[in-house]
Amino acid sequence: MIRDVVHSVKNHANCLLLTERRDHAETLARLLEAESISSVVLRGGMRVRERQTAESQLYKAQVIVATGKYIGEGFDLPRLDVSLPMLERMFRKREKGYKAMGYQFAHSWPKTRLL
């Protein structure tokens, strides 16, 4: 997975790396840092200052690492063009559920893709 992110970043992609576990998000961020890729972590349980610091880095970070529950519905950052869910089955199940509730998925970039 990290190799996919490194490859995407080298091709000037703006990535969202989704996982379900907070500790996994932190581990992924450390692995990205070891590859000289800047990232910001968005996860549940963040203190106010942690969240404010993370939010201030959203437009500078090469990769956003987040838990799916934290990102949830309504997260919009138009510059993101690659989504890398760590648990694709979970992602597809949620996507199907949101569609069943009438939500529509809008892609602001024609090259938005899921790896």
Image (cartoon, grey):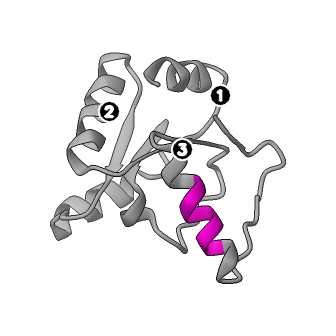
Please tell me in which quadrant of the rendered image residue 12 appears. Answer: top right
Q: Position of residue 64 (x, y in %)?
A: 44, 45
Q: Nearer the viewer, mark 2 or mark 1?
A: 2
Please tell me in which quadrant of the rendered image residue 40 appears. Answer: top left
Give the residue at the far right of this rendering.
110
What quarter of the picture does the C terminus occupy?
Answer: top right
Question: For the residue marked with disc 1, what is the amino acid?
Answer: His
The structure residue drawn at horizontal position 46% and vertical position 68%, both measured from the top left corner, is 72
Which comes sooner in the sequence, label 2 or label 1? Answer: 1
Question: For the residue marked with disc 3, what is the amino acid?
Answer: Glu
Which type of secondary structure does the marked residue at label 2 adopt? helix
Is residue 56 found left or right of 73 in the rendered image?
A: left
Q: CA distance from mark 2 to mark 1?
A: 19 Å
Mark 2 sits on what residue? 28
The structure residue drawn at horizontal position 74% and vertical position 46%, both measured from the top left corner, is 112
Q: CA distance from mark 1 to mark 3?
A: 23 Å
Residue 94 in magenta? Answer: yes
